[in-house]
């Protein structure tokens, strides 16, 4: 919706109605919605006249209903907004554009993103809604010192993850300044089986304004001098993927992708039967853990895999075995049909996972996607004989101190702000981990953190009948586990020089400052 308010409606010499129906312009792609919008505008005008006539006497009448011809039907991204109203006649642009992730876009929507950002641009991987932000910028780009203010309801993904250092950095560099924002909130509707949408509202202008910015978070209002694209009242910061692992971090990567169409995986029953019938395979049958197995089935193994990474001289015998030939042939054909060159290359060794990222020492496993309803991220140590799949993120040679820090509410506050999302779930990545500012630990604090980490692990072990998914439900976490986390949080906050009463905004202020200082070293 585009709103202009540069004209007035005269009623008498002293009083004027400053906004009339002709000041409102709109674009809507759905013909029925266009009719609804026009009707709504007429109703609003009728209500305005009724209220005005209680204050002043006027002979003006809004009938007949022919005054509202400024709601246009069409694709707003393919229309020239200047043909509807010139930017110098506009005060506000606002709307609720559609939220559509990369994998859900229609061919027309894909083309819209290419038209707006250019083919091959990184922005085309972001949510469709950002097109309206760029379109508004282009609309006023030739109108210097524009006073136009914009606000869009959007999916919260536009203020997280890679969207900030790609899309928002360009917007800020072009002169955009965020004037107010509403941090993530859940928007539901009454449609049956309609999932809740996690939204933000971002209001911005196209030049610097010397005024106080307003940031809303739930029922709390924070007034500040600046709001950055993470919707935090701090200076602008661009957290992007690091090309190399920082020296103070253990190696992190995703687990090993099989790309096997299920041929290298076994149920517990299949694993037992195969070990019995083919003893040569028993030492190559390994427990497998993906995100689902880690969260739901950690206490009772439900999945195994064939792992031939160290098969050695027994390989020819295994390849020729009748019970394996069909499996390997199926994998080979499946990989050869892939459009990815690395997968086709992996067809030469169909008995192996497409990539081997398995650590040879104990490692930490983190689900790549974790529910936003969890107060903490479920993380755990894993034996190197348990094969981690690519639905997990793994940390090599992690220490108990690493575990304690990653399991803290402080780290969760960072992750919630900078991680990408899959729907409403957080997407944990090496970018979240590698960019996370680590504190300097004294030997005494390291010892305390080791005990704190052991306290969390021991508390989990006290509940063998519960899965991690059950234990980490916000309202159902066992009291001893919650107590272990509270003690851990107290130590971690101490390590960062923070007190126990800090808010997430206080935490992020410290972490962003640490990140900037380290990034500029």
Image (spheres, rainbow, N blue to C red):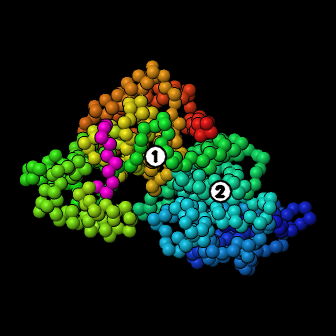
Residue 254 x/y as whole percent = 38, 49
Residue 233 x/y as whole percent = 65, 42
Residue 500 x/y as whole percent = 52, 28
Q: Main secondary structure of the magenta part?
A: loop
Q: Residue furthest right?
A: 13
Assign a secondary structure to mark 2: helix
Question: Which residues are the magenta region?
Answer: 353-362
The residue that appears at 78% across and 59% down in the rendered structure is: 147
Rendered position, 445 above or below 76: above
Estimate how packed mark 2 is, as few (under 14), some (14 to 19) or many (20 or more) residues with alpha carbons within 10 Å: few
Q: Is residue 414 magenta?
A: no
Assign a secondary structure to mark 1: helix
What residue would you read off at disc 1? 430
Judge left or right: residue 413 versus residue 69.
left
What residue would you read off at disc 2? 170
Residue 404 x/y as whole percent = 42, 32
């Amino acid at each position: 919706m585009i709103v202009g308010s540069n004209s007035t409606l005269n009623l008498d010499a002293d009083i004027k109605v400053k906004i009339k129906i002709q000041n409102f312009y709109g674009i809507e792609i759905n013909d029925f919605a266009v009719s609804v919008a026009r009707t709504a505008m007429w109703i609003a005008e009728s209500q305005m006249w009724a209220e005005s006539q209680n204050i002043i006497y006027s002979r003006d009448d809004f009938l007949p209903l022919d005054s509202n011809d400024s709601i246009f039907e069409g694709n707003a991204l393919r229309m020239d907004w200047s043909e509807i109203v010139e930017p110098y006649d506009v005060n506000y642009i606002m709307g609720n554009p559609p939220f559509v992730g990369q994998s859900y876009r229609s061919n027309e929507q894909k083309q819209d993103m290419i038209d707006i950002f250019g083919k091959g641009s990184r922005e085309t991987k972001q949510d469709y809604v950002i097109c309206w932000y760029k379109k508004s910028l282009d609309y006023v780009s030739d109108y210097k010192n524009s006073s136009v203010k914009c606000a869009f309801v959007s999916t919260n993904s536009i203020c997280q993850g890679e969207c900030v250092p790609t899309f928002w950095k360009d917007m800020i560099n072009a002169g955009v300044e965020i004037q107010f924002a509403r941090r993530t909130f859940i928007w539901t509707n009454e449609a049956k089986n309609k999932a809740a949408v996690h939204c933000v509202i971002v209001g911005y202008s196209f030049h610097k304004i010397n005024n106080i910015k307003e940031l809303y978070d739930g029922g709390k209002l924070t007034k500040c001098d600046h709001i950055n694209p993470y919707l935090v009242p701090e200076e602008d910061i661009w957290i992007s993927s690091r090309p190399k692992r920082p020296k103070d971090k253990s190696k992190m990567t995703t687990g090993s992708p099989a790309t096997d169409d299920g041929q290298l995986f076994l149920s517990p029953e299949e694993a037992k039967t195969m070990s019995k019938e083919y003893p040569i395979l028993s030492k190559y049958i390994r427990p497998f853990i993906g995100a689902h197995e880690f969260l739901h089935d950690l206490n009772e193994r439900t999945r195994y895999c064939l792992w031939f990474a160290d098969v050695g001289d027994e390989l020819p015998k295994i390849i020729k075995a009748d019970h394996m030939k069909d499996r390997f042939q199926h994998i080979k054909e499946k990989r050869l049909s892939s459009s990815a060159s690395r997968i086709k290359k992996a067809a030469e060794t169909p008995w192996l996972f497409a990539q081997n990222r398995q650590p040879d020492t104990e490692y930490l496993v983190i689900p790549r996607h974790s529910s936003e309803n969890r107060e903490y991220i479920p993380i755990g140590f894993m034996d190197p004989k348990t094969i981690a799949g690519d639905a997990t993120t793994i940390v090599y040679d992690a220490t108990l101190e690493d575990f304690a820090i990653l399991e803290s509410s402080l780290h969760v506050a960072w992750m919630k702000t900078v991680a990408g999302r899959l729907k409403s779930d957080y997407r944990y990545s090496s970018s979240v981990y590698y960019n996370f500012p680590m504190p300097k630990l004294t030997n005494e604090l390291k010892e305390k953190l080791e005990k704190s980490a052991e306290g969390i692990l021991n508390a989990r072990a006290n509940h063998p009948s519960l899965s991690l998914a059950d234990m980490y439900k916000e309202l159902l976490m066992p009291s001893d586990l919650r107590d272990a986390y509270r003690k851990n949080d107290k130590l971690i906050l101490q390590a960062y020089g923070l007190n126990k009463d800090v808010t997430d905004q206080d935490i992020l202020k410290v972490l962003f400052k640490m990140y900037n200082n380290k990034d500029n070293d």
